[in-house]
Image (spheres, rainbow, N blue to C red):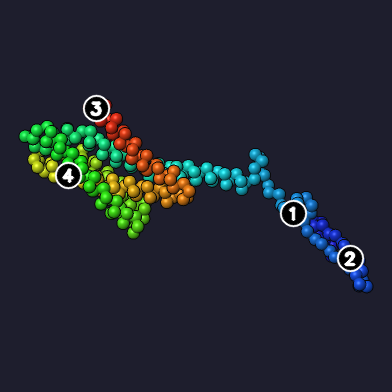
């Protein structure tokens, strides 16, 4: 039977070796048009690029954009949290005047307001330990979500607190509780966002992406300072 027209056939005469009669060896394979130096030529698109290289380039671009968006979303909470922290410090005189007994002197009210401010910093290590445990047992993402929620609720409640003139010493109690919750959430959110961001990237980029979390916190403090200076 003759070989198909799409294949090439070659008959090779093998000379007599040690008195053996000559034989014929038939080779069949693809035509020369389909072979280039032993490699099959990949089809190209209109731009001259192979589909695999084009798709891989677009996928890398999309991956880079997704990484940037997820990183910014993860550290955005640091800006808001540290902005609120800075705002409290700059408006401590007003807070002390409204949430502490009016019989106190202005200096005493400011000192009491800063005592509440310092209490929030004491809760930061507790928040870091608590959210670290949540991140190890559940997930880093869950720890980040909980810490952001814990910051949103007391921050909203801060704007709804009654003054000392309305509820008396309950105003001081509510203020202390809200600030302690804010300190707890700040301590957990900062570390949760840092761990969540760096673990989502290669080890060689941990320093670069980890700096985003600390930069966001400092930006929040800077914005709070600017707001406090402009309105004071």
Q: Which residue is mark 2?
A: 14
Quarter holding the C terminus is top left
Q: Is residue 180 visible?
A: yes
Q: CA distance from mark 4 to mark 1?
A: 78 Å
Whole-angstrom CA distance, mark 2 to mark 4, is 100 Å
C-beta proximity under 8 Å, tags 4 and 1: no
Q: Quadrant of residue 139?
A: bottom left
| Residue topped by disc 3 | 231
Q: Which residue is mark 4?
A: 176
Mark 2 to mark 3: distance in Å? 100 Å
Q: Residues within 10 Å of mark 1 (few under 14, many from 20)?
A: few
Q: Determine contact: label 3, label 1, CB under 8 Å.
A: no
Secondary structure category for the residue under label 4: helix
Tell which circle, 4 or 1, labels the residue nearer the N-terminal end: 1
Residue ID at (15%, 35%): 110
Residue 143 location (% of width, % of height)? 33, 52
Q: Residue at position x 43%, y 45% from top?
A: 207
Disc 1 target residue: 38
Counting residues from the N terminus, which is met first, the one under dot 2 or under dot 3?
2
Name the residue rendered at 8%, 37% in the picture: 101
N-terminal of the two: label 2 or label 4?
A: 2
Element marked by disc 3: helix
Q: Residue furthest bottom?
A: 19
| Horizontal side of residue 179 vs 52, given as left or right | left
Residue 8: give x, y in percent of width and height. 82, 57
- The answer to whether 31 is drawn above or below residue 116 in the figure is below
Q: Nearer the viewer, mark 4 or mark 1?
A: 4
């Amino acid at each position: 039977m003759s070989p198909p027209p799409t294949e090439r056939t070659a008959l090779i005469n093998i000379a007599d070796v040690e008195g053996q009669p000559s034989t014929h060896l038939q080779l069949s394979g693809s035509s020369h048009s389909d072979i280039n130096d032993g490699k099959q030529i990949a089809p190209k698109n209109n731009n001259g690029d192979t589909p695999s290289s084009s798709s891989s380039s677009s996928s890398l671009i999309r991956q880079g954009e997704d990484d940037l968006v997820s990183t910014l979303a993860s550290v955005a909470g640091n800006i808001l949290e540290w902005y609120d922290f800075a705002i409290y410090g700059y408006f401590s005189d007003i807070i002390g005047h409204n949430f502490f007994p009016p019989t106190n002197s202005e200096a005493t009210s400011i000192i009491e307001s800063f005592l509440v401010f310092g209490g929030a910093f004491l809760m930061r290590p507790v928040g870091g330990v608590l959210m670290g445990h949540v991140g190890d047992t559940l997930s880093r993402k869950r720890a980040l979500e909980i810490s952001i929620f814990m910051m949103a609720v007391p921050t909203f409640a801060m704007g709804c607190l009654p003054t000392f003139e309305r509820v008396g010493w309950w105003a001081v109690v509510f203020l202390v509780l809200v600030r302690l919750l804010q300190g707890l959430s700040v301590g957990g959110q900062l570390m949760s966002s840092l761990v969540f961001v760096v673990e989502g990237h290669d080890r060689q980029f941990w320093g670069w992406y980890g700096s985003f979390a600390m930069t966001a916190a400092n930006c929040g403090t800077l914005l709070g300072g600017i707001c406090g200076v402009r309105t004071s």
